[in-house]
Image (tube, rainbow, N blue to C red):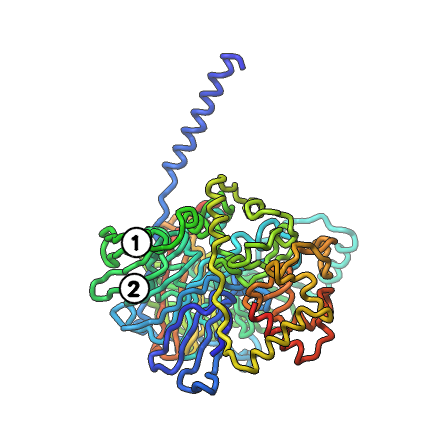
Amino acid sequence: MHTRGIIPSMLGAALVGWSALCSAEEAPAPKPPTFLPVDFESLPIGSLPPPPPDAAKPASVPKGSQVAGLTVAPAPEARAKTRSMASAIRAHKNKKRSPRKVMMLQVEAPELAALYVPSENVSEFDGDGAQRLSCDDRESVSSLRWEKLTLTPDGQAELAIQDVWFDSHSCAVAPGTASIVKLKAVAWEGTEPWLFAMRGETSLTLVMPKADDLTAGAMVGSTQTVRAGFTRVTLPLGRWGSGSIVANVRSLAFASPTDGGSGPLELTVELVQTMSEISPTLLVQTRSSPVASQDVD
Amino acid sequence: MSLARDPRSVVVSDDGTRAFVAHVVEARVSVVDLAEGSSTEPHAVRQVDLRARASMDDESEPSLRRGCQGFALVKVEGGGERGAKMVDRIFAPMVSVNPGDGSGESEGYGSESPSEVGEVAVLDASAERALTRLVRLPSSGTARTECLLPRAAAYDDGSLYVTCLGNDALVKLDARSLDPARAEVKRWHLAAGPVGLAIDHEGQRAVVWSQFDREVAFVSTESDAPPARLAVARQSDGITANVALGRRLFHQMGDSRISADGRACASCHPDGREDALTWSTPDGVRQTPMLAGRIAETAPYGWLGSSAKVEEHLKKTFERLGGDGLPETELSALVDYVTSMAPPVERAVPPTAERKELVARGHVLFESTATACSTCHDASHSFSDGLRHQVTTQRNSDPADGFDTPSLRFVAGTAPYFHDGRYKTLDDVLTAPDHAMGQSTRLSRQDRAALVAYLETL
């Protein structure tokens, strides 16, 4: 190798080394794991209402009916596509037969809301703050559930559950039953709570910021998960048994998915009760998440 | 009373009516009714299945992981402030294993990496059921520091203490967790070979016996004070320095010379025996062979008999495990240790006249031309002929010229059987029509029972 080639090579190697050193120095030290026992009996008692029964369904919703905080507007136009002649003819025929509009139901403050179609038979709901629904000639009323999380000034939280009826014929919405449950803060980042819980006769409900890679399971019964602006998980509770939740929480701040708090953290919630124990033990663990090293979308 | 193989630890329920027994292999705990039974009537024995899954999405039987290293067992005792609400919990430190799906060859041992995960199964003593149903696999690329050779455990006020052979550590775990292995609170590094543990509740300390270094450590559980150490005379161990070095190497975790994924020899050969597992390996599906008492006079080594010497076979094993290999001096020490391993104690079978007669009848059958057992399993050469035989295989990956005849020493305690572990019991081997080994399928039920009785004495 020529001398003039050695120096840039050495310089390059030094820069690579320096760069590696800088990266090592800049990398935040992983947080030590935390183990937070939660006194199960101190949790507020409450339960989430079941989906509204068919018997409660109205025959129709009057045109112009509204639900406070919920807007119904035409969905943004889908991007124009090149269509084949056959599909163009098909679309034309459909248009003649049934004028169909795609509408967007949008809740206020979607970052703290979940809007989804409730069902007894489904355990996982992906409910953003908006739902696309069709308005057409058919007489069809369907139900939607709107969960709205409010962080209260006392450091606790409330979860409002508003059922909504949507009539595709009138293209309008009407309020159904509504209820509010109280949640207790059980984990904090500094002074800011980021994990809330409530217990029922047969369930434990936890609410946390948006979570990825969520796995929840229990020995008896099935879990229910709602993923939207926040994440809610309800674990079934028997007289004895166990249940757990494992999730990656990218940010420990609600309504700030990318820059709040000091996440990401791997969260583990474990509920254990033997037949001889009066109440379950509830343990919340956090540790630096493996997703910390990955790109955040 | 007879129990499932390799019982190691026992705890008795608070009311004294049941004993819970840990087994080294097969991820299970036996429950023995102490209130019933007598010296003549058998006690009722039930099994608690500790197998868990790595995913909640798949509830099929094959998704259940296997288990090993079930040496210790401990129960909640004494209340205390942190553990006040816990009643009737039993903790079973173990290792959750995925040895592969048995379908054929794999890149390493098992079909996922890592194939072994430290776990502490939590049992409900009243329900006699495992509460831990899910094990969490460590993220790829993370350093493996978990306890993969747990040996002793103790409980104190909401905390679980486990000694980790191979890591030479004592770990303090949060006992409230559903899998306390994932809730490590604190770790102390101790002298080599920690296998004994007691808790001094009043003194707030753990007392740990490290067998290899022959040292007792007094560990303050509530302060950061360094452990006080008390050396015990080394000369009384009864083994040479070379064997002692080999023993340490055999149990060494995280040694990249031995394996790429950190597992030790003792991971698959607990106490020098075998893990009762059939692994997917680079050579195909292979049942783990027993080592203790089976090395001398059984050359060549390996299922294919491809190594004339133990050293050679160990080198190949390290290679298959992705290890870099040991230098000659340490390899020699390891050979000395595996060769010197104490064989299992003889199975405690009541020596009744009827039993003796059955065994004698079995011996005759074993040596007879009718069964042709002794044609290959030569009693004068540790029940092997050192040759390969085609005994009918089931997989394309198996070699056409068959497998090396394994020794039958202690065969009763080494289920499952055959190179691919296809038979669960000795009786299954003798009755199965799908192999070409011996002629035992023609035996009557009584003769088969006699032959099994004889095999149980080897």
Q: Nearer the viewer, residue A246 or B135?
A: B135
- Front tag of 2 and 1: 1
Residue B106 in view, yes or no: yes
Q: Nearer the viewer, residue B301 or B198?
A: B301
Q: Nearer the viewer, residue B346 or A81?
A: B346
Residue A106 in view, yes or no: no
**Residue A122 appears left or right of B433:** left
The numbered disc on residue B215 is: 1
Disc 2 marks a residue whose amino acid type is Ala
The residue tagged with tag 1: helix, strand or loop? Answer: strand
Disc 1 marks a residue whose amino acid type is Glu
Residue at the farthest top position: A3
Above or below, B176 against B395 in this view is below
The numbered disc on residue B198 is: 2
- Residue displayed at 47% across by 65% down: B24
- Residue displayed at 56% across by 48% down: B310
Q: Earlier in the sequence, mark 2 or mark 1?
A: 2
The residue tagged with tag 2: helix, strand or loop? Answer: strand
Marks 2 and 1, Cα distance to the nearest angstrom?
14 Å
- Residues packed near mark 1 inside 10 Å, few (<14), some (14 to 19) or many (20 plus): many
Chain for mark 1?
B
The numbered disc on residue A42 is: none
Above or below, B292 against A123 in this view is above
On the image, the x and y values in percent for residue A52 come to 51, 77
**Residue A201 appears left or right of A4:** left
Quarter of the rendering containing residue A90? bottom right
Residue at the farthest right position: A86
On the image, the x and y values in percent for residue B93 come to 42, 64
